[in-house]
Image: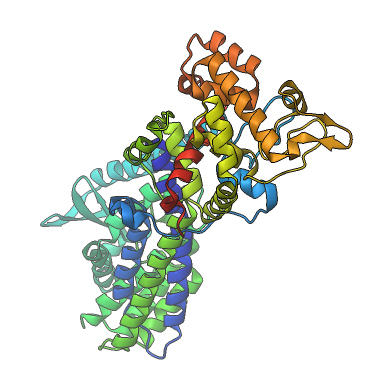
């Protein structure tokens, strides 16, 4: 559950970055048109896009299983032995010098990173909530000028400019006290702040505070908020002037008054919206929009086409992100069904979290599926030899997946004191089972003899530990290490020992590889 939430969070983060690039490019292009599009429409479109960035990763998991098993992009390019090891997801290193596979963050490091992120979210959320609560207390203490429905107009000696906010279940408009004596300025400014309420800008501001807390580290989230602020102000200006009550030139002069001095721009509290919220570039665009405004929507067809193109690009980005984050998802129920066939061969594979994660580590990435397909073909060419040796010593044939994890079924030369061959036996183990490993001659490179030794070793380990997961762990980490883990952990349950960190995840990687190799449809493009 926690892993799924983490993947959703990462996908949302990636979509926030890609979505901003898409819509910023679209809005920048649209502003260059002879008659720019209506900002109110683009405001709704961008809000829908921002919501889609947050909802699409969740909605994708509600689709049928078949829809989730689409082709996905792999990770960084690797080759040779590293690609094979990465494909299997094996993260353990056997005593005696077994070569490590693609590095993974340790559970402790991942947990530390998650706790640090959670602490940052909570701290940022607390600060944002504190500012909004302070705004609510300040609003309740202001003198009321007028109430109309759920809208309250207040006056403040501390506010240099009017602003709109939502608190205590009401919509508030706050104006400077001295502005009450200037009705020519007061009316259009109040109309502007009321328009913020009509557009839902004040609710969006509070949601923006929550989003800023959840993604406090995201470098593009402030740009999202600036884009929304720009569209909100442009939409308010267009709506106020389009009503015909206020002349565009006079309203432009009022914007210049509200935007200077700089302190007015800085005053607007968190969770509020105001006409003065304009940097120099935005103020210029607001004035230009009022100067060139048209009473009819300009380029409606082209505007709709551009908006649809941006949304389509965002959907394609969501599919890409979903794939890159491990789009193929295999659940515990899926693993349980896949394991039924292996149980008939004498190899029981539990549908626990380790197996599910290891299976997804293979099928979730195109690069790893390709490496497994290649290894499966090499295994098929030598399957008869493996089957004879395994049957002779009572080893379940699906455990041939061990060689896929070890070498991808490549006959690897290795180093003098490290593993070599398909089964990656270290010299001490190879000599223990009658193989000659010496200068100029290494019988670990003779497949039939090496397979016979590996089968005998697996059978011996199973006889000693009476459990295939423990036997696999001993093949990787050494018999002494497994004995120490069992004695120190007070249990012979390999999965419990793995959960406690006393054993590596090698057994899970091998059994997951066995499941995948027995069900090649999981490796399809």
**Residue 87 versus residue 415: which sits nearer the camera?**
415
Q: Quadrant of the N terminus?
A: top left
Indicate how the structure is coloured in the image.
rainbow
Position above or below: 238 against 19 = below
Residue 290 shown left or right of residue 466 in the figure = left
Farthest residue to the bottom: give it. Answer: 34
Most extreme residue toward the right is 439
Q: Position of residue 19 (x, y in %)?
A: 43, 64
Q: Position of residue 65 (x, y in %)?
A: 31, 51
> Position of 96 compared to 387: left or right?
right
Name the residue: 22% across, 49% down. Answer: 143
Residue 248 vs residue 490, the one in the foreground? 490
Quarter-of-image position of residue 86: top right
Residue placed at 77% from the left, 27% from the top? Answer: 427
Number of numbered labels in the structure image: 0
Residue at 21% from the left image edge and 54% from the top image edge: 171
Residue 123 appears in view = no
Up/down of 113 relative to 468, above or below = below
Q: Is 122 on the left-hand or right-hand side of 103?
A: left
Vertical position of residue 205 compared to residue 37: above or below = above
Please indicate whether residue 488 sits to the left or right of residue 245 in the image.
Answer: right
Q: Position of residue 401 (x, y in %)?
A: 54, 39
Give whichever of 430, 288 is nearer the camera.
430
Q: Looking at the image, which is closer to me, 309 or 515?
A: 515
Residue at 46 percent across and 38 percent down: it is 357
Residue 400 seen anywhere in this rendered image of the structure:
yes
Q: Residue 210: horizontal and vertical position, in percent?
A: 36, 47
Looking at this rendering, what residue extends furthest in the left direction? 149
């Amino acid at each position: 559950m926690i892993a799924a939430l983490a993947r959703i969070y990462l996908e949302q983060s990636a979509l926030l970055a890609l979505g901003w690039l898409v819509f910023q490019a679209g809005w920048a292009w649209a502003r260059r048109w002879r008659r720019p599009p209506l900002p109110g429409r683009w405001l709704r479109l961008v809000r829908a896009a921002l919501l889609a960035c947050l909802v699409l990763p969740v909605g994708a998991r509600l689709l049928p299983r078949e829809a989730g098993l689409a082709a996905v992009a792999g990770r960084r390019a690797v080759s040779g032995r590293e690609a094979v090891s990465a494909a299997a997801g094996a993260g353990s290193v056997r005593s005696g010098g077994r070569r490590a596979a693609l590095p993974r963050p340790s559970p402790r490091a991942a947990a530390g990173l998650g706790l640090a992120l959670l602490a940052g979210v909570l701290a940022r959320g607390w600060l944002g909530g504190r500012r909004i609560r302070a705004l609510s207390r300040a609003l309740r203490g202001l003198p009321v000028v007028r109430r109309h429905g759920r809208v309250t107009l207040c006056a403040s000696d501390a506010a240099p400019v009017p602003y709109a906010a939502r608190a205590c279940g009401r919509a508030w408009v706050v104006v400077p006290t001295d502005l009450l004596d200037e009705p020519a300025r007061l009316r259009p400014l109040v109309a502007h702040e009321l328009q913020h309420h009509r557009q839902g800008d004040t609710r969006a501001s509070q949601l923006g505070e929550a989003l800023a807390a959840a993604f406090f580290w995201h470098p593009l989230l402030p740009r999202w908020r600036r884009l929304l602020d720009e569209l909100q102000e442009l939409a308010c200006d267009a709506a106020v002037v389009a009503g015909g009550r206020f002349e565009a030139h006079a309203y432009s002069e009022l914007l210049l008054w509200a935007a200077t001095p700089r302190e007015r721009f800085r005053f607007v509290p968190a969770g509020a919206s105001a006409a003065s919220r304009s940097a120099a570039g935005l103020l210029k665009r607001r004035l230009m929009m009022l100067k060139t405004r048209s009473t009819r929507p300009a380029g409606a067809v082209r505007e709709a086409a551009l908006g649809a193109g941006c949304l389509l690009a965002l959907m394609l980005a969501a599919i890409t992100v979903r794939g890159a984050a491990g789009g193929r998802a295999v659940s515990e129920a899926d693993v349980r069904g896949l394991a039924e066939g292996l149980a008939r061969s004498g190899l029981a594979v539990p549908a626990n979290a380790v197996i599910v994660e290891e299976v997804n580590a293979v099928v979730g990435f195109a690069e790893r599926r390709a490496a497994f397909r290649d290894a499966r073909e090499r295994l098929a060419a030598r399957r008869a030899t493996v089957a004879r040796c395994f049957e002779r010593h009572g080893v379940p044939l699906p455990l041939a997946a061990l060689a896929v994890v070890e070498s991808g079924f490549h006959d690897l030369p290795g180093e003098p004191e490290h593993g070599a061959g398909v089964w990656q036996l270290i010299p001490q183990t190879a000599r223990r089972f009658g193989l000659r490993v010496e200068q100029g001659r290494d019988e670990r490179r003779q497949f039939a003899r090496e397979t016979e030794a590996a089968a005998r070793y697996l059978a011996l380990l199973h006889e000693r530990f009476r459990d295939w997961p423990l036997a696999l762990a001993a093949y990787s980490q050494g018999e002494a290490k497994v004995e120490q883990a069992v004695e120190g952990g007070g249990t012979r349950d390999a999965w419990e020992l793995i959960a406690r960190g006393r054993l590596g995840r090698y057994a899970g990687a091998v059994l997951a590889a066995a499941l995948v190799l027995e069900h090649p449809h999981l490796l399809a493009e």
